[in-house]
Amino acid sequence: MKWNRIAAGCLLCAAGIAIPACARRVATPPPEAVPVTAAPVERRNVPVEVTAIGHVEAHSTVGVKSQVNGTLMSVGFREGQDVRQGALLFRIDPRPFDAALAQAKAVLAKDTAQAQNARTLATRYAELFQRGLVPRTDYEAQTAGATSAEAVVSADEAAVEAATLNVQYTKIPAPAPGRTGAITAHPGDLVRANDVNPLVVINRIAPIYVTFSVPGNLLDQIRQYQAKKSLKVDARVSQATDTHVTGTVTFIDNAVDVTTGTIKLKGTFSNDAHALWPGLFVDVNLQLAVDPQAIVVPTAAVQTGQSGTFVYVVKNDRTVDMRPVAIARAEGTESVVASGLKNGEERVVTDGQLQLTPGALIADRSSSQRAE
């Protein structure tokens, strides 16, 4: 009898006759909401930038060398010190050169006296020759001797000037402003003229250059923007401290590198705080322009499917709609949308898209976080 009642109940359920037990079994549970994170669609001014890796170069690099041989007497600066142009860096023993200068002056005085005497004799012989008292050969010999003596005086004057320069070369000033490097000679060392190794290297680091390369296909765009105004370039020195310095593009190379397809640019930075240092590699952002009132979404919201890029848009009934979008460009963690979205009126899913289908019910975790 018990099995008969069970069988009869099942037949009633199969025939569509509602009984309480069967109604509970066939009831469909409500769909579960998919937890997601969403962010609003925004409209704001977005800079048009090109990113690259840059290399810091000194504005000028000068190797200081001696122009005379001699014993180094003193060094007038410390390693790593900032020096101004004309500051005394090294002093070489001037005594041998002072003696050479005195000797050259003495020779000049002697030869000058002899030249004056030769010129006086030449003048006298000219008068006598005109009166027919001396032969032409004697007159011409005296004239040639006076000319030769004057040439000797000119050579002596050049020797005195060279000796004077050598005395001046015993004092070595800074040929350019900048920061000094390591000193390779010390007092007592014998230095040689135009030696292979400089006595010190001076790098001018304020201002300073940052050299970087960008794709060659951006050259026309860069030139167009540069024709309108100076292009700003931002260099990030350290990610840890987030140190940034700003300069302007002052050089565009005259040819595209055929091996890499890139073109070299150079930015000039005032570098008053010495944040940039020669040899450093820095992250470079070249700002070409500002895109006014661009529609922006987080890059994490943009998905790629068979039909192209799309986003999940949150509707008022807490369901989502799959919306095709056109992305103009990506700027870091944000993407600029060319078409497909409206700013300030819509929200897009940024996390949890893998569990979504068009029309799926969602639970916006970002809303609860904002409420907290």
Image (tube, rainbow, N blue to C red):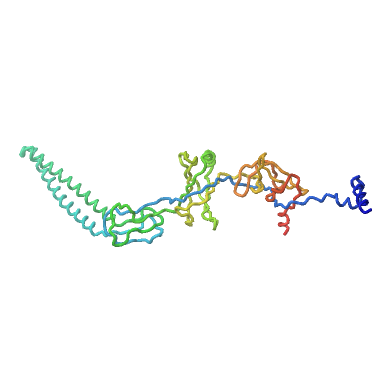
Position of residue 211 relative to residue 97, above or below, is above
Question: x, y percentage for residue 360?
Answer: 75, 47
Disc count in the image? 0
Q: From the viewer's perspective, is 348 left or right of 82?
A: right
Residue located 39% across and 51% down the image:
61
Q: Is residue 129 visible?
A: yes
Question: x, y percentage for residue 265?
Answer: 48, 44
Classify residue 326 by image quadrant: top right
Q: From the viewer's perspective, is 322 left or right of 14?
A: left
Q: From the viewer's perspective, is 274 left or right of 62?
A: right
Front residue of 267/278: it is: 278
Position of residue 331 relative to residue 183, above or below, is above
Placement of the C terminus among the 4 image quadrants: bottom right
Front residue of 114/295: it is: 295
Question: x, y percentage for residue 318?
Answer: 76, 49
Question: x, y percentage for residue 129?
Answer: 8, 38
Front residue of 324/99: it is: 324
Q: From the viewer's perspective, is 208 left or right of 121?
A: right
Q: Is residue 345 visible?
A: no
Looking at the image, which residue sits at the far left?
133
